[in-house]
Amino acid sequence: MDATECLAGIRLMPVLALRDEAVALRLAHILRDVGFRALEITLRTPQALSILERLARALPELILGAGSLRSPAQITEAKDAGAQFLVAPGYTETLLAAVNAERLPFVPGAATGSEMLRLLEAGYRLQKFFPAETLGGAPALRSFSAPLPEVRFFPTGGINSERLPAYLSLEAVAMVGGSWFVSDEALQGGDDEAIGAAATEAWSLAHG
Ligand code: 3PG
């Protein structure tokens, strides 16, 4: 299965940097109840892998992936923890070879036309566009995608509710990712209602 198939129908992906298992469990339940079917857990915290493993056991109905992938060693670790897909901020030839060997759906990142072409050449028709807002946002992505009709994009980085519709209106955008609707403050403060409300607002915007 490739990433396009694995993530078919997903329009908005929560991109989460998690440090606390109990908080992560609470958050994942809230997001699932709101309607999210897939979550990306970034490998940016020391706890990310054990949290991924815990979530995979507790919520098997969710499609869980590991993000911020940087090294071949992390591919095996993420797979062992239960990741069903991988996301990276870019790619290297080493990473592409290692992911191929593990046969896990992978969304590599591209920020230039040459990177997009290289990834297309390697068979990646779903590519992360990162950091989306810094690279010029939806207008830039529209320009990049015009000569690349085969590629679908997963823009992330600096996107929020105001910017989301412009991305999702592009034919080239399969789904958008972000963390703007998961407030750290609400999470730490245990304000599940606020988290649920923000997540519902984002989900409705993406699926309206
Ligand atoms: C990512 O890793 O994809 C981004 O950091 C998520 O972007 P955001 O936190 O700016 O929404």
Image (cartoon, helix red, strand yellow):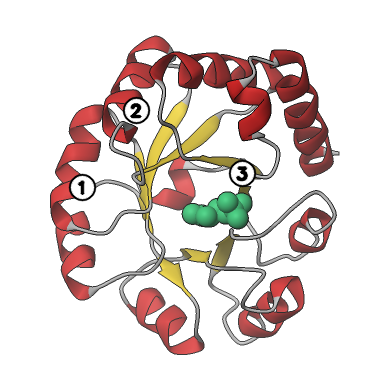
Report the amino acid beneath label 2. Leu
Badge 2 residue CB within 8 Å of ligand 1: no
Q: Give the quarter of the figure containing the C terminus.
A: top right
- To which residue does mark 2 refer? 52
| Marks 3 and 1, how far apart at CA | 23 Å
| Marks 1 and 2, how far apart at CA | 13 Å
Where residue 104 sits in the image (x, y, percent)? 27, 46
- To which residue does mark 3 refer? 179
- To which residue does mark 1 refer? 75
For numbered disc 3, what is the local secondary structure? loop
Where residue 180 sits in the image (x, y, percent)? 68, 44
| Marks 2 and 3, how far apart at CA | 17 Å
From what the image shows, is residue 99 above or below residue 199? below
Task: Check disc 2: other Cα within 10 Å, few if <14, some if 14-19, many if 20+.
Answer: many
Locate residue 142 relative to residue 96 in the image: left or right. right
| Mark 1 or mark 2, earlier in chain | 2
Q: What label does residue 138 carry, if any?
A: none
| Mark 2 or mark 3, earlier in chain | 2
Q: Give the quarter of the figure containing the N terminus.
A: top left
From what the image shows, is residue 130 above or below residue 159? below
Residue at position x 52%, y 33% in the image: 38
In this rendered view, identify the residue nearer to me: 89 or 6. 89
Report the amino acid beneath label 3. Ser
